[in-house]
Amino acid sequence: MSIVLRPFVFIRPKFTAGLSYPRSSSMAMACGCNAADARWSMASLRSALPSVSVTPATSVRFPAHKSSNLYPIRKPQLLEGSFTGLCPVNPLLSLGISNMKSYEHNFIIIDNGSRVFAMRHGRKVPKLNRPPDQRRALLRGLTTQLLKHGRIKTTRARASAVRKYADKMITLAKDGSLHKRRQALGFIYEKQIVHALFAEVQDRYGDRNGGYTRIIRTLPRRGDNAPMAYIELV
């Protein structure tokens, strides 16, 4: 005995006002079949379906995978000299811990290959609105012109920045050694100025220890109103 399942087609009946329809006829119209064929049971429907063999679920075990430790944790080395000065040599003896020499055992050090640097407090460099290579070239040119002419006019920021290098060149010339001369030749652009500086610096600044330049403020620059100053050799 085989049961043929018909596709479910919903046909919306046209109801007329004032008329009543029996429940069996409406079900037959909804199922798309006669009223006699509309009676069915779940048992007969289940028996008509094909049997499906159900296999019991088997447990699947994956191989144990050892997780690679990207950041190896190393134990800190306990040093004897961790507490010096006013601190006792072994402050943990009062707590009954004799094998601990410091409090570093409470911290975990993660060694991931990084380096820790301190903050740059007090290391401000006048940038002069230029990258490092152009800034160094500017300072070398200003130092060369200052040693050549003895007095130049520039902005206050550049004058304050070039003062350190001009004093350093004069200090190298006062030493007078060949190594210092080569260092000055590597910074000053004109070779003749270096030789003249090394020849005349002892007569001019032999008795002076530092302070070889002077900065004199002047009127702002016309156009952008930048603060200007004269820097000259003493």
Image (tube, rainbow, N blue to C red):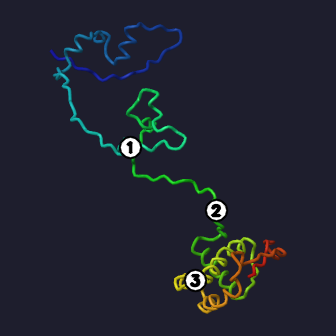
Q: Mark 3 points at which residue?
A: 184
Mark in the foreground, 3 or 2: 3
Q: Quadrant of the N terminus?
A: top left
Q: Which of marks 3 and 2 is nearer the N terminus?
A: 2
The kind of residue tagged 3 is Ala
Determine whether 67 is above or below 225 in the image.
above
Q: Which residue lies furthest to the right in this view?
A: 219
Determine whether 136 is above or below 39 in the image.
below
Determine whether 89 is above or below 130 in the image.
above
The kind of residue tagged 1 is Gln
Q: How far apart are marks 3 and 2 (CA)?
A: 25 Å
Image coordinates for residue 214, horizontal then vertical, percent: 76, 77
Which type of secondary structure does the marked residue at label 3 adopt? helix
Q: Which residue is drawn at 48% across and 52% down?
A: 116
Q: Picture quarter containing residue 21?
A: top left
Q: In this view, does 51 lie to the left or right of 199?
A: left
Q: Name the residue under label 2.
A: 124
The numbered disc on residue 31 is: none
Q: Picture quarter containing residue 173?
A: bottom right
Image coordinates for residue 51, horizontal then vertical, percent: 17, 20
Q: Picture quarter containing residue 160?
A: bottom right
Q: Name the residue under label 1.
A: 77
Q: Which of marks 1 and 2 is nearer the N terminus?
A: 1
The kind of residue tagged 2 is Lys
User: Do labels 1 and 2 touch, CB within 8 Å?
Assistant: no
Mark in the foreground, 1 or 2: 1
